[in-house]
Image: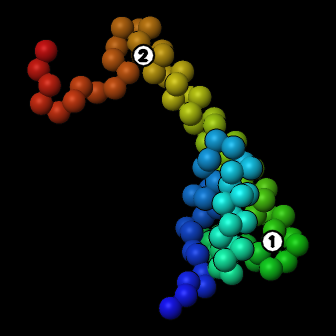
Amino acid sequence: MQITDFIITEVSRLSRADRLDETLKMEARIISTGVKIGFAEQHIDTDTDEGNLMKNLSYVFANFESKKIGKRTKYGQKGRILNGYRPFARPMGYKP
């Protein structure tokens, strides 16, 4: 039995790497095996030039958003520390 389709919920789930080129290399490796990539929640037809453009733009936006989330998280944790709070909740069962 051979896998013919690789279905992902949405483009952003595949494009969460820090570097966009890593996502494109991973996608190329999957496609080179003859497997077609599909997206369950987004109707992107990768058989057309327009569909590939939309997919690639979605990769760029997902990568950008992933980096922004990381920065906001980092700044939020730093702010909590500077205000005298712990950046995370205490582990379950921890007693000072």
Q: For residue 93, which quarter of the picture?
A: top left
The earlier-in-sequence mark between 2 and 1 is 1
On the question of residue 3 being in view, the answer is yes
Q: Residues within 10 Å of mark 1 (few under 14, many from 20)?
A: some
Instruction: Say which of 75 and 30 sits in front.
Output: 30
Q: For residue 82, which quarter of the picture?
A: top left
Q: In x, y percent, where is residue 4?
A: 60, 85
Q: Hey, which residue is sitting farthest right in the picture?
A: 49
- Say what amino acid the circle numbered 1 marks: Gly
Q: Residue at x 63, y 35 (%)?
A: 68
- Mark 1 secondary-structure assignment: helix
Q: In x, y percent, where is residue 92?
A: 17, 33
Vertical order, 29 against 21 (above or below): below
Q: Residue at x 72, y 74 (%)?
A: 32
Q: Residue at x 78, y 59 (%)?
A: 56
Marking on residue 51: 1
Mark-to-mark CA distance, 2 and 1: 43 Å
Q: In x, y percent, where is residue 34?
A: 69, 81
Q: Does 58 sit left or right of 4 as displayed? A: right
Q: Nearer the viewer, mark 2 or mark 1?
A: 1
Q: In x, y percent, where is residue 35?
A: 65, 79
- Mark 2 secondary-structure assignment: helix
Vertical order, 22 against 78 (above or below): below
Which residue was labeled with disc 2? 80
Q: Residue at x 52, y 25 (%)?
A: 74
Q: Residues within 10 Å of mark 2 (few under 14, many from 20)?
A: few
Counting the numbered discs, the total is 2
